[in-house]
Amino acid sequence: MRTAARLTVLLAAVALGLLPASSVDAARAGCGSRQVSQPFLPWLDASDYFLLPGGDLESSAGWTLSGGAQIVAGNEPYRVHGAADARALHLPPASSARSAATCADSDEPMLRFFARNSGSVLSSLAVEATVRTTVLGLTVQTTIPVGVVPGTSQSWAPSLPAPFELSANQLVGGTTTVDFRFVPLGPGGDWYVDDVYVDPFKDRAPS
């Protein structure tokens, strides 16, 4: 139902001359096919996910690191991306890391990753998404909170699925990309992140 409603909005925009018909075609086509897997199946999550660009954290390629954030030895122990993986992202206090951008479609994507807190249990890990949509040469940027991982556990564990719904100005065709920023919060925040995945089809009910 939601997909049909969004397409209706797109068609109305075309009828009013606000958008060319090609924008509707692009929105309907979405981001095309992706290589997906079920990395969280052992945790009873049977959804298909694709790896965020650079999401294996085997190198810093595609990432913007600040405040001492760096790639270090020590992969999440489940090695859901690959048995040979051996590295992860370290986020000490006052640091941050921004991922490379990836195409986002209008099907309410879901983010999920592995995290470990090695600092104070009073700290947490915040994640935000920056969505950029370019339509007819005009870029609209929106930053939205995605979720917060509490610091109560100091063992590697998958985060809860964190949805981020695209707002109306990201649903009118054009090109939409999203990147994610990870920031430790609170006293003594010292975090590790690994294997960052996106589920592009949280809303799987038939249209």
Image (spheres, rainbow, N blue to C red):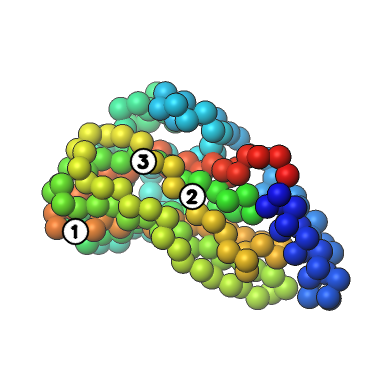
Residue 108 as seen in the image, left or right of residue 92: right
Q: CA distance from mark 1 to mark 3?
A: 18 Å
> What residue appears at the point 65 percent right and 75 percent down from the top-left corner?
138
Question: Dot 3, crowdedness within 10 Å: few (<14), some or many (≥20)?
Answer: some
Residue 149 seen by the camera: yes
Q: Name which residue type carries label 1.
A: Gly
Mark 3, residue position: 159
The residue wearing badge 2 is: 163
Distance from the alpha carbon under mark 2 to that under mark 3: 12 Å
- Asked if disc 1 and disc 3 are in contact, CB closer than 8 Å, the reply is no
Secondary structure of residue under mark 1: loop
Q: Residue at x 86, y 71 (%)?
A: 15
Residue type pointed to by label 2: Pro
Depth check, front residue: 89 or 147: 147
User: In the figure, is residue 178 to the left or right of 99?
Assistant: right
Q: Amino acid at mark 3?
A: Ser
In space, the residues marked 1 and 2 are separated at their CA atoms by 23 Å
Q: Which residue is mark 1?
A: 186
